[in-house]
Amino acid sequence: MYSQDETISAVLRFYQEVIRHPYLNDDALIIPSPSGWDSINIQGKTETVLELLRHLPYLRAEKRFDELIIHWETVPICYPHHQDYHEIYPLPAHCVYLAHSFDREGPSLILDTNEGTLTEFYRTGSHITINDEDYEALPEPDKWKAHRTSPITEFLDTWARRYEKLVWMLAPNPSGRPMTGRFYSRAKSSAEEEELGRQGQLEPWPLPEDIHPDDDDDANENENELDREQREERIRHRRHVADVYNIYLRYGWPNHFDKERCRVELLELEKMRDAYDKRRMDEANPDAELFD
């Protein structure tokens, strides 16, 4: 059952949780006056959709061409400033994108005002609720309907809780491109997301500094060089996620959080990661600068 008031409240709760993270400034969250955003008048949508869009809160980027994130490669749409948003996969008049995928990997969020639901639409065809053969047989405009779908409030409250419990975390991107933030998850699976979301008090993540790839549970004595490099990269990424998480806790998350000091340290951490990645790329391609 769709309710405009409940939808607005759920979106607001979610965005309020997102801006607690040391990625966006508090003023990134913009809230309409009681009369709503009078600039929104998108063609091809029902009045129910338009009324919702006119009264939703939004996340607004500081610069016109900046891309914010609320999940892996998922960009929230700020309709008061992007009324010309083009639907790559056109939706029925009673449906609207709340967020779109930046690339192929991230989910787009599709809100259905007839059903009162949100759908995670992955262009790659992951997280579908039917078998692959039936999915491929669907007309292209209908494929989004076969993806994971939940009631709006349940969906957004689940996502908000994952940010509250630091299952998911957002950090600033030093380069600001292709998106202004970086998304990290402590979970390796949907089941682990659920488990971590039920945690009580958050404790530091004791990931040893001296962990060695040969000690990894995924190690396989028959793996080739590429497999080994990929496994080692997963270990490095896991350690980096642990560093991000522990920095959050060190600055008082959740109840005594120093957002600005946490942001400064996270920014330095991300710069160090970028420098490390660049060194590895240079070592792997020593002649690359000749073609710049």
Image: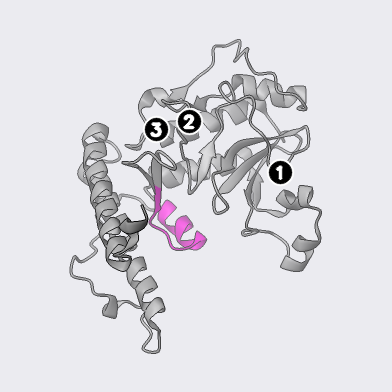
Q: Quick one: SS at disc 2?
A: loop
**Residue beneath the point at 26% across and 37% down:** 263
Are the residues flagged by discs 1 and 2 in contact, CB closer than 8 Å? Answer: no
Q: Which mark is residue 213?
A: none
Give the percent coordinates (x, y) of residue 93.
78, 32
Earlier sequence position, callout 3 versus callout 2: 3
Earlier sequence position, callout 1 versus callout 3: 3
**Residue beneath the point at 35% across and 78% down:** 217
Give the percent coordinates (x, y) of residue 10.
55, 32
User: Residue 198, can we see it?
Assistant: no
**Residue beneath the point at 32% across and 58% down:** 290
Earlier sequence position, callout 1 versus callout 2: 2
Which amino acid type is marked by label 1?
Tyr
Crowdedness of circle 2 by 10 Å Cα count: few (<14), some, many (20+)? few
Left or right side of 86 for 178: left
Image quadrant assignment for residue 55: top right
Image quadrant assignment for residue 43: top right
Which amino acid type is marked by label 3?
Ile
Crowdedness of circle 1 by 10 Å Cα count: few (<14), some, many (20+)? few
Kindly identify which residue carries mark 2. 65
The magenta region covers: 183-197
Q: Which mark is residue 89?
A: 1
Crowdedness of circle 3 by 10 Å Cα count: few (<14), some, many (20+)? many
Q: Quick one: SS at disc 3?
A: loop
Specify the farthest residue to the front: 290
In magenta segment, residue 105 = no
